[in-house]
């Protein structure tokens, strides 16, 4: 016989909470969350249910409760009363297994998510990383471990603020803010790795002048949660000591934070690791290929000798904006894009967010090609990030404003999916799950600030399809390929005034 509504239990059942793990009920009991049915416990359980993977969040919470250093009684009481903490912690634990492991291994890190928190400034982060290096000077062997923990703490805070809106009514961080802050964290981490390298190689001697030029997404301040960080080393002198410092910096950073890749330097991995400004100038004047000038569009002096970095950029950036005068410029860029796409196996090409047809790389290549062509005479196109480039191209009339807005929305949506997929295990991946696979993972519960909404998988493809339209030239239809748009709108002297 059905009980009257007034006699039904106030606490939602495991099934209503969306928990599917057979041990979920026992875990809730272990935490003491089923002992009382007051409103605080009801709100707590419903908040848990909104985590991207509520079962994963619950398992991590049990591990925290079992850790005697976590201060579980304090955390448990705070979760019942502090909505913002619930939103941040449940969102992270339900989105990232790796960050969940970090919180369990460093059980006081949850306090970083408490109260009114804001993203730290670039200077503040750099100071905290350098302070960590100095504090580890008495135990050099522990510096990498300490730096890794500090780096994960910064990722934890950013991810919590980025994801909290999926669980509670918290502010949504725009994609551009998240990507820029990830680059700022990377800069601070590189500065710390450089300081460790200088101490290791030079000891008490004055370290050599060395500038680290960030390239790629780090240089453009549009970094992923998990990405190689591309760099170029510029030395006051290209001597063995400077080269040793650069090599040691790469080793420390790759061990503590992320893989550091210097493959974009002149002559690639077969070239010298460190060159002087004059050596770089000579190379780019005589030997550089078109793609190397394209890569320089993202160059930014990140850490190290600021004056040396400025000299490098002042000398090389003007060459970028005359690269389109080279013979077969457009053909070379198109051929490079085709080679990149051929690296993706055909059976996964439709699910590849980055390299697949209509994916992130297509958007980036199209924007960069138009920048290179028209940037000769329009300084407003001299911007590094893809979103800023698309905005400038739309404002300048090189592509239609509606096309620019659609491209930006689609690009940000695909980058949002990329972030959610990478967060799950902090692994570098750009591959969408198959439609038949579970959607209960970090990639599906997203709340984009703009662009497509609704069922994620179809809209992922919708976003990719809409991104193939890249210019406002006559005859460019939504089904037109990137290469056809390039061949029309990237001719020197051509300019589409779609808004006219």
Image (tube, rainbow, N blue to C red):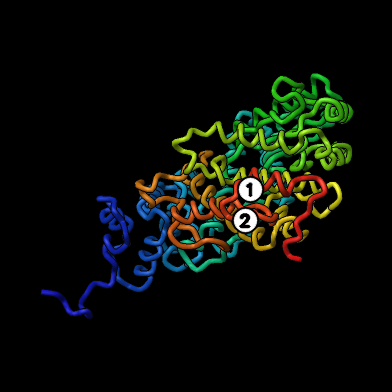
In the image, residue 24 sits, relative to residue 297, either above or below, namely below
The image quadrant of residue 270 is: top right
Q: Alpha-carbon neighbours of circle 1 within 10 Å: few (<14), some, or many (≥20)?
A: many
In the rendering, at what x and y percent does residue 107 appear? 48, 48
Of all residues, the one furthest to the left in this rendering is 1
Q: Secondary structure at mark 2?
A: helix
Question: Which residue is at the front of the view, 221 or 453?
Answer: 453
Q: How many numbered discs?
A: 2
Q: Which residue is mark 1?
A: 363
**Res 144 → quadrant:** top right
Residue 206: in sight, yes or no? Answer: no
Q: Quadrant of residue 466?
A: bottom right
Residue 421 rendering spot, x and y as whole percentages:
49, 46
Q: Where's the N terminus, which quadrant? A: bottom left
Q: Is residue 374 above or below residue 322?
A: below
Estimate the x, y position of residue 432 in percent, counting from the top left. 46, 45
| Mark 1, secondary structure of its residue | helix
Determine whether label 1 and label 2 are within 8 Å by CB: yes
Q: Nearer the viewer, residue 202 or 295?
A: 295
For this orientation, the residue located farthest to the front is 475
Circle 2 is placed at which residue position? 407
Q: Earlier in the sequence, mark 1 or mark 2?
A: 1
The residue lying toward the viewer, choosing from 419 and 33, is: 419
Q: Tell me if I can see residue 217 in this picture.
A: yes
User: Which x, y percent locates residue 236?
Assistant: 87, 29
x 80%, y 39%: residue: 324
| Residue 259: numbered disc | none
Position of the C terminus by quadrant: bottom right
Residue at position x 67%, y 58% from top?
404
């Amino acid at each position: 016989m059905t009980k009257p509504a007034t006699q039904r239990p106030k606490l939602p059942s495991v099934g209503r909470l969306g928990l599917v793990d057979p041990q979920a009920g026992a875990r809730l009991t272990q935490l003491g969350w089923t002992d009382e049915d007051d409103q605080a416990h009801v709100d707590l359980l419903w908040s848990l249910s909104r985590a991207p993977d509520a079962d994963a969040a619950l398992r991590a919470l049990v591990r925290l409760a079992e850790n005697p250093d976590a201060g579980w009684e304090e955390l448990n009481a705070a979760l019942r009363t502090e909505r913002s903490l619930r939103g941040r912690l449940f969102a992270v634990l339900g989105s990232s297994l790796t960050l969940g492991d970090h919180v369990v291994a460093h059980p006081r890190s949850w306090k970083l998510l408490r109260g009114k928190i804001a993203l730290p400034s670039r200077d503040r982060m750099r100071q905290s990383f350098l302070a960590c290096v100095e504090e580890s000077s008495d135990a050099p062997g522990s510096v990498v471990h300490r730096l890794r923990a500090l780096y994960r703490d910064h990722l934890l805070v950013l991810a919590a603020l980025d994801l909290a809106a999926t669980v509670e009514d918290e502010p949504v961080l725009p994609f551009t803010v998240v990507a820029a802050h990830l680059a700022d964290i990377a800069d601070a981490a590189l500065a710390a790795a450089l300081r460790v390298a200088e101490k290791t190689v030079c000891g008490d001697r004055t370290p050599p002048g060395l500038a680290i030029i960030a390239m790629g997404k780090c240089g453009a301040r549009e970094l992923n949660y998990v990405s190689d960080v591309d760099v170029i080393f510029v030395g006051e002198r290209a001597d063995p000591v400077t080269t040793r410092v650069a090599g040691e910096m790469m080793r420390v950073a790759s061990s503590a934070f992320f893989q550091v890749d210097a493959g974009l330097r002149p002559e690639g991995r077969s070239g010298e690791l460190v060159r002087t400004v004059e050596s770089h100038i000579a190379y780019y004047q005589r030997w550089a290929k078109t793609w190397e000038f394209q890569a320089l569009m993202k160059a930014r002096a990140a850490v190290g000798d600021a004056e040396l970095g400025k000299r490098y950029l002042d000398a090389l950036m003007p060459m970028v904006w005359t690269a389109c005068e080279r013979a077969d410029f457009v053909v070379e860029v198109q051929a490079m894009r085709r080679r990149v796409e051929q690296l993706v196996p055909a059976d996964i090409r439709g699910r590849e967010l980055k390299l697949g047809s209509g994916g992130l790389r297509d958007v980036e290549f199209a924007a960069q090609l138009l920048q290179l062509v028209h940037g000769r005479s329009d300084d407003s196109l001299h911007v590094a990030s893809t979103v800023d480039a698309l905005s400038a191209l739309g404002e300048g009339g090189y592509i239609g404003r509606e096309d620019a807005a659609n491209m930006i929305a689609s690009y940000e949506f695909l980058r949002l999916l990329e972030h959610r997929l990478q967060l799950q295990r902090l692994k570098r991946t750009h591959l969408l799950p198959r439609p038949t696979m579970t959607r209960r993972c970090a990639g599906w519960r997203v709340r984009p600030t703009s662009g497509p909404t609704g069922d994620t998988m179809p809209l992922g493809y919708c976003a990719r399809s809409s991104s193939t339209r890249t210019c406002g030239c006559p005859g460019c239809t939504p089904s037109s390929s990137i290469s056809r748009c390039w061949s029309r709108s990237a001719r020197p002297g051509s300019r589409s005034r779609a808004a006219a």
